[in-house]
Structures are given as structure tokens and as C-alpha cells.
Amino acid sequence: MEIGKTTSVCPVCLARIPARKVVGADGNIYLEKRCWDHGPFRTLIWEGDLESYLAWGASDVPGSVIPVGAGAVERGCPYDCGLCQSHERDGCCVLLELTNRCNLRCPVCFASAGEQAPRDLSLEEIGKQYDLLLSRGGPFNIQLSGGEPTMRDDLDAIIALGKEKGFSFFQLNTNGLRLAREPGYAAHLARAGVSTVFLQFDGLEDHIYRTLRGADLTQVKLDAIQACREAGLPVVLVPTVAPGVNDQALGDILRFALSQAPHVRGVHIQPISYFGRCGLEAPEKRLTIPGILRRIEEQTGGLMKYADFGGGGAESPYCSFHASYLHRENGSLKALPRRKSQCCCTKSSEARDYVAQQWSGRVSGSDGDPDTASLDAFLQQVVENTFTVSGMVFQDADNLDLDRLRRCYICEVDSQYGMVPFCAYNLTDRKGRALYRKS
């Protein structure tokens, strides 16, 4: 049974093709499409019935914002990113890729880091990218990324330059190796102005890291968290979750994160997307939002429940999930209320403010219980005993829905293209060809 139409791309040639959402014989929701040259494709997008699918989208807020400085529509989505005038959100969080160097060779890497000749952006290039972002509606929240950004020794100068230009929030996306191994490095980053550490954290067992990262890293992750604790740097744990690898480790990750609260602010889950360098084959039964939430409820013994979670507001609700909790002294959790009829972050600029406020652990001056109605309100009204679980379901060529993509406000900044939605920038066909990312 067909329940909706959209537009997607062919996973083989990346041509734009019509797609439809259908209820399968098993009751789950699928994206079906056909390329004239490469045939039909069918991908699971919702592991649950139609009622649950429609209920999840009830908080959807129609797109209404044309981004500042948007370019003309020429070829259409997803080919005119930078952003174009058909995009429906301005920016919030922007990835600034400082280097393509990395001190790991992960079998799973959306950026395919380490495959090309080593290159670092110069401070002059970074300054121009800051200026570009300001001309496009910034200052946005900056995610210092790569490659591995800590391969550079001038993060302090990069942050200082950003602050001079009016940026105030700097998230460090890192594997944690340097934090764990270099005494005093975390304190150096804290003094430099890093707002929060977004730490790659796939589990608590080395076999998980061997599969996803190519090395035994459990102790490294624990040491990195301890170094950040001592330096007063807030941490968010970020597991990439792959079926059959660590989807049964979510309960362990969440319980561990709770044991490290309030220094660990929460967990941000990223179900694996099959783009870039990915040594894992996409299974027929992919991880979807309902599948992740059911695992969370089962593996935490009901401490965290499916019903606690909701979808995003500024982005498409089918892109994200989130819940915030009051962490009581006895170890129990109380789910904090979500406003179902109104989104607290229906604009990207509002979501931007919440991210800066909450991922860095700065306490809001608002009274009352926090509302949690958007992914990028990751830790709303953070206080010492608030803990948040969220996630982002990135799209690849198999499940790309251009209606969702036009709502994206997590972008990559690129000197040639401008601001490109994350899923478009990292989109690759089955031979690894990208639309935007440079080889």
C-alpha cells in the first residue's frame, strides 16, 4: 500500500528518480524507487506499523525559511547545494573539516579520512570559511572536524580566529586518542575555548572497535573521558551503531554514560549510514528509529522507554530522536515532558542557541522543567542532574529522501560549494563516487 511520494536518487548512478513510501507485507515502511538504467530498489525506512510512522511525524513543522545568500535553483535537489533557494532551513551546526589526516584507519568513515594526500586548511582558508558562514546567516555553531582535528597543533589559533569573527560555540569531533595519550592536552583545549567534546564511543568491548575502528580502543576512550573530566571539558558520547556489531551494546553504553554524569552530558546515537568508506555491507533489515528505541527500552530494562522519545522540530522528525531525563540520586530516571503540539526549536537559529547552551553544559536561566522537542535542543535547560539521549539517522543513496534533505540544517562548509547539507556532502554511489566531497 502506497502512503506517500517523494524523490530520491539511484544508488548506482545518483540520478534523481521518483520514489514512493509503501507499507510492506510485514507491516513495515519501505522506500521503493526505480532507475531507468539500473532497475528497482527497496529499502526499509521504518521498522513499525503505519500508525506509529504517522504518529512520529505529527510534530512536523512545514519548511518556510529560504537560507540567507541561497543560490538559484538550476539542476534541483540534491545538485544545487550551497545552499539553494529550494532549501527550507537556514544553518545551525556546521562542520569545519580542518584536515584530512587521521591517526586511525577506521573501516567505517564517512569522510574516507587518510585516503588522499595529507592536507590541512590554512588559517587563511579557515578565515575565509568563517567569513562565508557569516555572509550566509552566521555565526553558526562550529564543529571542528576532519579527518581527526587533533592532528593539528593550532586548534587554539583556529578557535581564537573564530571568536574574533563572532563565533562562540566550538564542538570538537574526535576519536579521543590525543586526549587520552597526551598529558595536559585536554586542559589546553579547555583554555583554548573548546565548548564540548563529541567523543566517538562505540561501546565498552574491544571487538566492537576492531570491527568499526580497526584497533582495540576501549581503554583509550575511558582515558579520554577521564582527561576531559579533570580539565572540566563536557563530553557527549557518540556511538556509530551497526547491526550485528554493537546494536546489542546500547544498554551498556547508556548505563556507562549515566555512571559518568553529569560530566558526560548524554549520548548521541548515529545508526550507521552506508556512504564514504564503509567495510560493512548494508543488511536487508537496516537500523531505523523504532528499532533503535526498542533496543534502548529492552537493554535498559525499561529505565528508558520508547514512549519517552520524540522526533525533531527544525529538521524532519524522521531524521532524529531525543529524550531528556531527570537523573535522581537513587539512580532512577524521570522522563522530562515534551510539548507535542508545539516545537520549541522550529527555527534553526533557535536550535543553534540550544546546542550552544546545552552541549557546553551552560545552565539556562529559564524556570520550570525543560521541554525537549528538537534534536538540536540536545540538552535543554541543562542542570547538574539532567541527562539526554538523542540520535541522528543520516541518509545514504539507498534511503535518501529529498523532502528530508531540504529540511537539513547540519551542513559542511566547503570553499567551492558553500554550505552543503551533511547527507548530500557525504553522499556516494556504490562505487564511492561523491557529488560534493573531493576525492
Image (tube, rainbow, N blue to C red):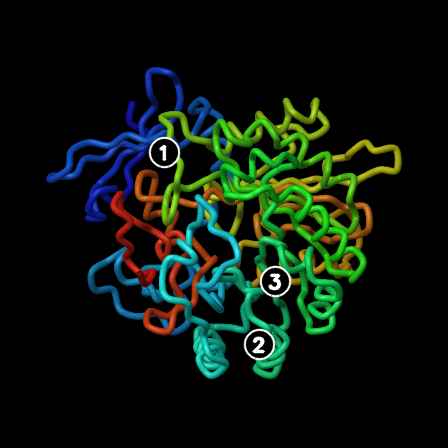
**Mark 1 is on which residue type?**
Glu
- Camera-side residue of 331 and 65: 331
Could you tell me how many numbered marks the image carries?
A: 3
Q: Residue type at mark 2?
A: Ile
Residue shown at 70% from the left, 24% from the top: 302
Mark closest to the chain's N terminus, 2 or 3: 2
| Residue 208: % across, % down | 56, 35
Q: Nearer the viewer, residue 326 or 129?
A: 129
Q: Is residue 435 left or right of residue 378?
A: left
Q: Which residue is mark 2?
A: 158
Q: Is residue 180 visible?
A: yes
The residue pinned by badge 1 equals 281
Whichever of callouts 3 and 1 sits on the residue coming sooner in the sequence is: 3
Determine the residue positioned at 51% across, 73% down. Answer: 138
Numbered tag placed on residue 171 in the rendering: 3
Around disc 3, counting alpha carbons within 10 Å, would you say few (fewer than 14), some (14 to 19), or many (20 or more)?
many
Name the quadrant of the C terminus: bottom left
| Left or right: 438 as drawn, with respect to 267 | left
Helix, strand or loop status at disc 3 = strand
Q: Would you say residue 135 is visible in this rendering?
A: no
Kind of residue at disc 3? Gln
Measured as percent of width and height from the top left, residue 213 is found at 51, 44
Q: Is residue 320 left or right of residue 232?
A: left
Image location (x, y in percent) of residue 223: 72, 50
Residue 396 x/y as whole percent: 36, 44
Look at the numbered disc 1 and give the secondary structure of its residue.
Answer: loop
